[in-house]
Image (tube, rainbow, N blue to C red):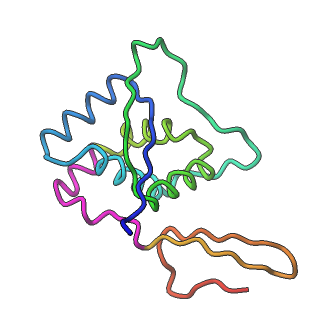
Amino acid sequence: MGEMKIRTTINIRRELMDKLCVISKKKGIPVRDLLSSMLIEQRNDGNATYLAFSRVRYQERRRNAQWRRLHITLRGDEYEFCLDLRKVRKMSVSFLFAVAIEQYLDKLVEKYGKDMDKYCYHDYAIMKFDVEGIICWVIYWGMPRKILTP
């Protein structure tokens, strides 16, 4: 059985989509690989905080002509990671990608060029614990030297 693939659609502002496509073509890196790598950059941003008890934020409203629809296929682990980021950052998946393009695309391409295979999700895990009847979920975005246990 092959690796699970999940198709999804995101809405991106025209200027961000144009920038993404230009860099993809210029550097020879598929758009989906750029997007995936930028989410890892977003994960690693130490300035981002969790907004507990707040609603999910969406991109600002614009006329339909200012949007581009992008169909992407993500691996199962990438898709789960998107959902985790959505929960932690309290942003729609499309908004996560928009912010990633604005904040990380140029830095990422400058830093790694075509060597994007450095970015992957192999150090990503979700574990469930039961501590005295309380269900605890731990999300690892990287693997610690010592795994947390109850």
Residue 103 on the magenta segment = no
Q: Nearer the viewer, residue 138 or 49?
A: 138
Farthest right residue in view: 133
Q: Position of residue 106 (x, y in %)?
A: 26, 43
First to last magenta residue range: 106-122
Q: Is residue 32 above or below residue 134?
A: above
Q: Position of residue 123 (x, y in %)?
A: 44, 73
Residue 107 on the magenta segment = yes
Residue at x-position 87% and y-position 82%: 132
Left of 74 or right of it: where is 49?
Answer: right
Residue at x-position 36% and y-position 39%: 101
Residue 25: image quadrant is top left
Left of 2 or right of it: where is 8?
Answer: right
Left of 57 or right of it: where is 104?
Answer: left
Give the tally of numbered discs: 0
Q: Position of residue 133 (x, y in %)?
A: 87, 77
Residue at x-position 59% and y-position 71%: 126
Residue at x-position 51% and y-position 81%: 144
